Amino acid sequence: MSTPTTALPMQNLLNSMQGMASEASGKPAIADLSVGVSFGGALRESLERINALQGESAAKARAFQSGDPDVALHEVMIAGQKASVAFEMGVQVRNRLLNAYKDVMNMQV
């Protein structure tokens, strides 16, 4: 169980993660995750957005390599950087969650 003092930083982390994912994908951000969305749901949604950004990046790269005149090099580079930043954010969140889990598991009861 989380206390109010630990729930607020976790909520801030989720709001921050949601905002970054929304900026990277170009979708509007959800204002407050505390209403009706579980932690697992928010995490799953963020991972799906990261996956979508990587898929979009790969699709643009393939289109550019095949000579599609509608895809410019700068679009490919921007999509690649968005996907890279989103992936790194996901890795950092995973690392922090894993460290928090290990800390909880190592607590003396």
Image (cartoon, grey):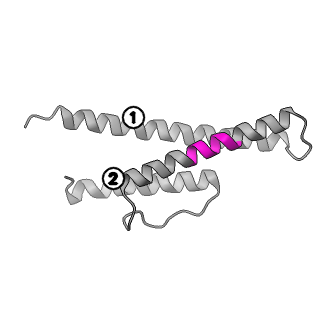
Q: In the rendered structure, find residue 49 and report the number of the disc placed on it.
A: none
* C-beta proximity under 8 Å, tags 2 and 1: no
Q: Which quarter shows the C terminus? A: top left
Inspect the image, locate mark 2, and give the three-letter code of the amino acid beneath it. Answer: Met
- Residue range in magenta is 49-56
The quadrant in which residue 55 appears is top right
Q: In the rendered structure, find residue 95 and report the number of the disc placed on it.
A: 1
**Would residue 99 appear left or right of 103 to someone viewing this image?**
right
Location of residue 100 in the rendering, given as x and y in whole percent from the top left corner: 28, 38
Inspect the image, locate mark 1, and give the three-letter code of the amino acid beneath it. Answer: Asn
**Would residue 87 appear left or right of 108 to someone viewing this image?**
right
Q: Which residue is mark 2?
A: 10
Write the residue at 17% across / 31% down. Answer: 106
**Distance from label 2 to label 1 (Cα)?**
14 Å
The quadrant in which residue 72 appears is top right
Q: Is residue 50 in the magenta section?
A: yes
Nearer to us in this view, 9 or 44: 44
Location of residue 5 in the rendering, given as x and y in whole percent from the top left corner: 23, 57
Write the residue at 65% across / 57% down. Answer: 26
Write the residue at 49% across / 55% down. Answer: 18
Q: Secondary structure at mark 1?
A: helix
